[in-house]
């Protein structure tokens, strides 16, 4: 079977017993909102046993660290990402990015309990739940916001309307016209959404320009929160780099 490098790497990690959740671009591929992704982004459990199992899998993949910091529970739990590049022949060049904590997200245990599990080419893959993936994509990066829109709209137009999914749509739809359509379609849920989301409140009035402006403001505020989260971590990364370059006595 000619599996992709990403599935081969996931297979090695799963066999190690390390508990991980797929996120990032490849998770968006599996949810049907992206065509491809070159990297493997994983949320991991950072306790000692799981990290030992993960290190075993990385050794099997002949994966070498490509940046600071090193793989440690302390730095992972602070919110840092740890980066590796695979050198094993069948996954050569694949980059693996590992995180254990993200802004505004609950702990790994909660995320694991509500994960999505799929089968891809015979491989079992555990992904962040769609709602959690959308939350994780609310960053300062320009490329993430169109992806959020595609993820949520793909779910909305699939039409599997449950109380949970309707609440999700009304809380996360990012196209003004679609949000206005949704609040008209689900008026009772829309009244509740309008109490906590200004964009939904504008959509209830049918005011397209006001809804668009509220969505833009929502994005600006999320970008600012993301910058504030990463600023101290960036300073720590600079210190890690200086420490690595400092001559040893």
Image: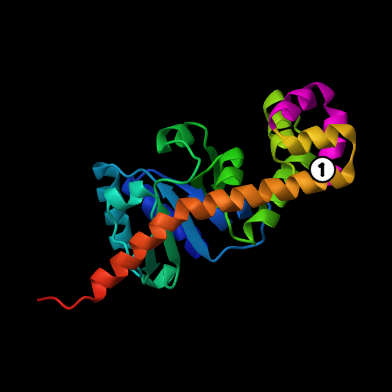
Q: Which residues are magenta?
A: 176-196
- What's the residue at 60%, 48% (across, down)? 222
- In depth, the one of 45 and 12 nearer the eye is 45
* Residue of label 1: 211
Residue farthest to the top, as pictured: 188
Q: Is residue 87 magenta?
A: no
Q: Tag 1: Cα neighbours inside 10 Å, few (<14), some, or many (≥20)?
A: many
User: Residue 245 location in percent, x, y?
Assistant: 25, 76
Q: Nearer the viewer, residue 71 or 91?
A: 71
Please name the predominant secondary structure of the magenta segment in the image: helix
Which quadrant of the structure image shows residue 162?
top right
Query: Residue 16: image x %, image y %?
Result: 32, 49
SS assignment at label 1? helix
Residue 158 in percent (x, y) is at 77, 40
From the viewer's perspective, is 34 left or right of 50? Answer: right
- Examine the rendering and report whether any part of residue 63 can be seen: no
Q: Is residue 190 magenta?
A: yes
What is the quadrant of residue 147 in the picture? bottom right
Question: How far from the left and from the top, in percent, is residue 22?
Answer: 49, 49
* View extreme (bottom): residue: 247
Above/below status of 193 relative to 41? above
Query: Residue drawn at (84%, 24%), measured in percent from left and top?
Result: 187
């Amino acid at each position: 079977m000619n599996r992709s490098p990403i599935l081969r790497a996931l297979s090695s990690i799963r066999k190690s017993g390390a508990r991980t959740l797929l996120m990032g671009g490849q998770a968006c591929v599996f949810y049907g909102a992206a065509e491809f992704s070159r990297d493997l982004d994983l949320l991991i459990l950072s306790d000692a046993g799981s990290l030992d199992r993960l290190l075993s899998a990385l050794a099997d993949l002949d994966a070498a660290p490509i940046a600071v910091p090193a793989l440690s529970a302390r730095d992972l739990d602070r919110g840092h990402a740890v980066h590796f590049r695979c050198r094993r022949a069948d996954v050569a060049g694949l980059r693996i990015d590992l995180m254990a904590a993200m802004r505004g997200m609950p702990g790994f245990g909660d995320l694991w309990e509500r994960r999505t599990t799929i089968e891809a080419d015979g491989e079992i893959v555990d992904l962040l739940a769609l709602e959690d993936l959308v939350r994780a994509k609310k960053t300062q990066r320009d490329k993430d916001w169109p992806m959020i829109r595609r993820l949520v709209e793909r779910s909305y137009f699939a039409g599997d309307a449950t109380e949970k999914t309707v609440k999700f749509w009304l809380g996360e739809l990012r196209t003004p016209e679609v949000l206005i359509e949704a609040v008209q379609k689900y008026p009772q849920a829309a009244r509740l959404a309008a109490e906590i989301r200004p964009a939904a409140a504008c959509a209830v009035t049918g005011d397209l320009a006001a809804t668009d402006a509220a969505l833009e403001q929502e994005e600006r505020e999320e970008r600012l929160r993301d910058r504030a989260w990463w600023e101290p971590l960036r300073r720590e990364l600079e210190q890690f780099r200086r420490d690595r370059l400092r001559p040893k006595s």
